[in-house]
Amino acid sequence: MTREQAERRCAALSGAVREFPFGPETAVYKVGGKVFALFGSHGMNLKCDPGLAETLREAYAGVVPGYHMNKRHWNTIVLDGDVPEAVIADLVEDSYDLVVASLSKAVQRSLGWAPAVDGAE
């Protein structure tokens, strides 16, 4: 997946806003004022469940602890083809869901978001 494809995926999510607080090369995607994706020269940073973060780092050379982020809760995905597109797409949605889950119920409703139910996709 290219950076452009990954950014399009982020931008398509309900309520996603792109900002450039660190300069023109670093795109930051937020929902409800909170970051769920950050793109820079290093790749893209995505929020991740800590257990899954470790598993992904072991499975893919292109997944490393989050660059300039909390290494327990963020991964950097190097967009060099090592990580399959479908996995990246799922990780973008997971990052978004983790952030939206931390927002107020009113904001969640305004986004049309509902938490996933175990066993349902």
Image (cartoon, rainbow, N blue to C red):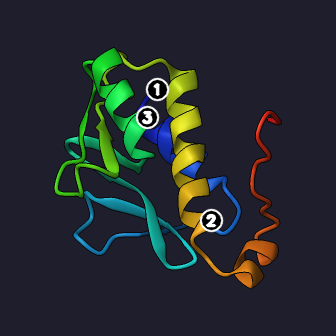
Residue 75: tell me if it is visible: yes
Q: Residue at x 46, y 40 (%)?
A: 4
Q: Residue furthest left?
A: 68
Determine crowd level at label 3: few under 14, some 14-19, many 20+ residues with C-alpha closer than 10 A. few
Secondary element at image label 2? helix
Q: Residue at x 58, y 34 (%)?
A: 90
Q: Which residue is mark 3?
A: 52
Q: Is residue 50 left or right of residue 116?
A: left
Label located before the other in sequence (3 or 1): 1
In this rendering, the label closer to the viewer, 3 or 1: 3
Q: Which residue is mark 1?
A: 1
Label located before the other in sequence (1 or 2): 1
Q: Residue at x 34, y 70 (%)?
A: 20
Q: Residue 68: horizontal and vertical position, in percent?
A: 16, 56
Q: CA distance from mark 1 to mark 2?
A: 26 Å
Q: CA distance from mark 3 to mark 1?
A: 20 Å
Secondary element at image label 3? helix
Q: Which residue is mark 2?
A: 101
Closer-to-camera residue (119/28):
119
Q: Residue 92: horizontal and vertical position, in percent?
A: 53, 44
Residue 98 placement: quadrant = bottom right
Residue 79: tell me if it is visible: no
Closer-to-camera residue (17/48):
48
Q: Amino acid at mark 3?
A: Leu
Q: Residue at x 27, y 64 (%)?
A: 24
Q: Amino acid at mark 2?
A: Ala
Q: Is residue 12 left or right of residue 69?
A: right
